[in-house]
Amino acid sequence: MKTTNLHTNLTLIVAVSENDVIGKDNDLIWRLKNDLKRFKALTSGHCIIMGRKTFESFPKPLPNRTHIVITRQKDYKVPEGVIVVNSLEAAIEQTKNDSNPFVIGGGEIYKQALDLVDTIEFTRVHHSFEGDTFFPIINEDIWKQHHTIYNEKDDQHKFNFSYITYKRR
């Protein structure tokens, strides 16, 4: 059951291995060119909500997006234009003028956001990896697969992968 309705169209976006790994040592494990393009296309022009460690994994803020970083650190220093808050609820409040903000990680933020989002844009990487950060199991009593696109590995993609859009039931 959805615990609150702070936003009407909040989307979580994530890439997950077959064994539910999403990262290792605060970094992506795989690079799928088309998945990165899809991430850019979906999130451009929108607010992106993330934890501090996810933000720190970027070489610089991503262009054409409003970055909202959640941290418990007082006086956390960020580049101009990046918004710092201390809770997911405060981050969502910052997105009230965005028609479709995105939660982009990491693991703890995803766990907190799962009960608050309406849509999950899920990339399933059809391979298992070692990692230290995992995505929760999607409860199919709550989430319905709305749309799936399967992608074969090729010279630019080392692994098969699928785009799956889940909508809250």
Image (tube, rainbow, N blue to C red):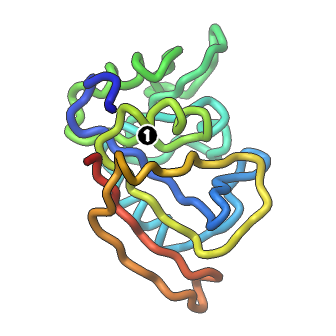
Q: Nearest the camera: 86 or 143?
A: 143
Instruction: Judge whether 111 appears above or below 140 on screen.
Output: above
Say left or right for 56 vs 129.
left
In this rendering, is residue 1 above or below 122? Answer: above
Q: Position of residue 110 (x, y in %)?
A: 52, 39
Toward the bottom, the furthest residue is 155
Q: Position of residue 61 (x, y in %)?
A: 53, 41
Q: Secondary structure at mark 1?
A: strand
Q: Is residue 80 left or right of residue 30?
A: left
| Side (left or right) of 54 relative to 2 | right
Q: Nearer the viewer, residue 82 or 154?
A: 154
Farthest-out residue, front: 141
Q: Position of residue 38 (x, y in %)?
A: 40, 65
Label 1 is placed on what type of residue? Answer: Val
Name the quadrant containing residue 72: top right
- Name above or below for residue 132 compared with residue 156: above
Q: Could you tell me which residue is drawn at 34 percent across and 38 percent down?
A: 117
- Residue at 31% from the left image edge and 57% from the top image edge: 144
Rendered image quadrant of residue 153: bottom right
Residue under the image location 43 percent in, 40 percent down:
103
Measuring 66% from the left and 74% from the top, which residue is drawn there? Answer: 127
How many other residues sit within 10 Å of disc 1, few (<14), some (14-19) or many (≥20)? many
Asked if residue 23 lies left or right of residue 125, the reply is right
**Image quadrant in which you'd find residue 157:** bottom right
The residue labelled by disc 1 is 103
Count of numbered circles in the view: 1
| Viewer-closest of 65 and 160 | 160
